[in-house]
Amino acid sequence: MAAESKTTGAGQSETMGFQAEVGRLLDIVANALYSEREIFLRELISNAADACDKLRYLAIETPELAAGDNDYAITVTADKVARTITIADNGVGMNRDDLVDNLGTIARSGTSAFVDRLTGDKKKDVSLIGQFGVGFYSAFMVADEVSVTARRAGEEEAWHWTSDGKSQFTIEPAEKATRGTRITLHLKEDADEFLERMRLERIIKTYSDHIPFPIRLAIAGDEKDEAESAEETPAQVNEGSALWTRPKSEIDDAQYSAFYKHVSHGFDEPWMTLHFRAEGVIEYTGLVFVPTERPFDLFNPERMSKVKLYVKRVFITEECDELLPSWLRFLRGVIDSEDLPLNISREMLQNNPVVAKIRSGLVKRVLGELAKKAEKEPETYTKFWENFGLVLKEGLYESAADRESLFPLTRFASTTADGLTSLDDYIARMKDGQKAIYYIAGDDADKLRKSPQIEGFAKKGVEVLLMTDPVDEFWIPACGEYKGHAFKSVTRAGADLSDIKADDAPDAEKDEDKAEESKDGAVEGLAIALKLKLGETVKEVRASDRLTNSAVCLVADESGMDIHLERMLRQHKQLDQASPRILELNPDHPLIKALASKAGADGTGDIGEAAELLYDQALIVEGEQPSDPSAFARRLSEVMAKAIG
Ligand code: ADP
Ligand code: MG
């Protein structure tokens, strides 16, 4: 919490500064665009619903907490005279610490992601609100003063929190007869529209219809309206039943979308919506979504599954990691089980056979739907794959049982295909005599396309897949092959091209092979000379048929680790030293030819500092540093001086 806190004398009233990030956030929020302002109500209702969900869950084990009032409801009251809107709920409420922690700092990760993205350019930043949402703080889009009176369920004391949303807030003891939270917004001069019944009704219907608690709307200070709603409970505006319990045919896209935004805290639209009922040995309803945008915290190591677990319409937890494998962690939504006991604890969820069954059913359904999408809408599927493919690929090594369904969903960039290709399409394009699925791994597809190691493959028209996700280094060795075709890295020595027939003139190719044999002999002396010079730095020096344009390249031993994996491990300090690689020479390259004739058949001729220069060159092409950059620069300058002079 912010350091500067001072007691202002008057009883226990205390004024504290907002956390610095909240201050920055509020500054942006105050400038929110008109069209976006109405979402404040959705955010506050969403919080009220969460609070009701929380208490309903806690009350299963401790019924006293609900103190006999199990009629959870949210009331929105607009007062035209006072120019206020009040959102009240009888949920779990907040005590003093809760108020200070939740409404003074940035507790929720979505909001902190918003703050991280702030550019300092107000216009740009304001439009970011649309992407992230800012939860409670969105109240300050329409209000210049917000006060919160809250009493935590099971506690006697109530507290009053108030702020003008500038730099600080005040907190003091208050009176409140019942548990829950009441938030009052003192509207800004230009926010009168939010006092109109029609406007409020529309906002609630649009964004909060699916909230499974009644949302009631009352208008005070308006004679006509007051006469209408005379005294009794104000009218309920929303449908008020859990959306997933309603028949599909009665739900439209807009309703699914609003619900998605509520459960995901996301601002995009669902890319795929899966609403189903599983009936049989176990019964459950699922309403799960694949987001259109990649959630910002997809790679947060603590990130848990974000699908909420309900039991018979009662919210249980949103942190049930057993419900979904981590490689489906991009899914949002709810699962509502009929078979689990209501009073199930988090511990009991582990190793629970019902949960395990739901999980496997869910995996099957989701993968099945993805396969359908991939087939029917390949273009939109590509968008999905670009967002979540790298997460799905984790499943290839984590979950051997699902490999068969996962492989057909994978897509890869390749040296020959436009866009992304599936493995089956790759196999269909394999050349005569080609057995393996060739790939090259690295960080950047464009750089990989220029790698010397793939030159020979390109010449023969052999397609090479470009693996640019770190996770590729894990599933490839774990899986080894697909449909009997081994995955082979072209940066490893064994990738042998001689068995594969080129596209054109197979006979000429044979002649060329013969010619190559003699070429191997021609560079043998040079290979000896280079190995002598480089010593233990390289494992071996030899001629290669994988190069066409480059003079040299480095490859790893067949049994060794892939070059890219080794580099990754070194970057993460999991490996101290690179293991020596094989330096391959292009016998057709003029430089190699010239050096070979200098070196002579026995390799005793003088080749100057060619060994060091060739090796450093190969390192640079790999994206690595020469072993001694200043020596490299000196050697290069000398060679250039000679060439010019
Ligand atoms: P989020 O809802 O994503 O957690 P918010 O900014 O909307 O973020 O709310 C911050 C926190 O304030 C909530 O997580 C919750 O702990 C608390 N809070 C907000 N409104 C209420 C409410 N009506 N009842 C109880 N707690 C609330
Ligand atoms: Mg919220």
Image (cartoon, rainbow, N blue to C red):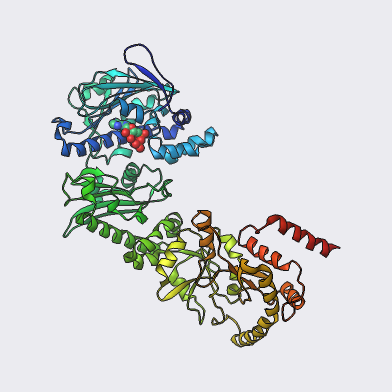
Residue at x 28% of width, y 18% of height: 173
Which residue lies most toward the left here?
68
Q: Is residue 163 above or below residue 630?
A: above
Position of residue 603 in the picture relative to residue 624 (left or right): right
Picture quarter with the N terminus: top left
* Relative depth, front residue between 627 and 482: 627
* Image region (quadrant) for ligand 1: top left
Q: Provide residue 46's location: percent of width, then percent of height.
A: 31, 36
Q: Where is residue 394 shown, x and y percent of the image?
A: 40, 59
Q: Is residue 243 left or right of residue 133?
A: left
- Residue beneath the point at 67% across and 83% down: 521
In the shown orientation, is residue 141 left or right of residue 332?
Answer: right
Q: Is residue 32 visible?
A: yes
At 15% from the left and 30% from the top, the residue drawn is: 67
Where's residue 20, x and y in %?
46, 29
Residue 42 shows in the view: no
Is residue 350 rendered to the left or right of residue 192? left
Query: Of residues 528 and 317, which is closer to you in this image?
Result: 528
Quadrant where the C terminus is found in the figure? bottom right
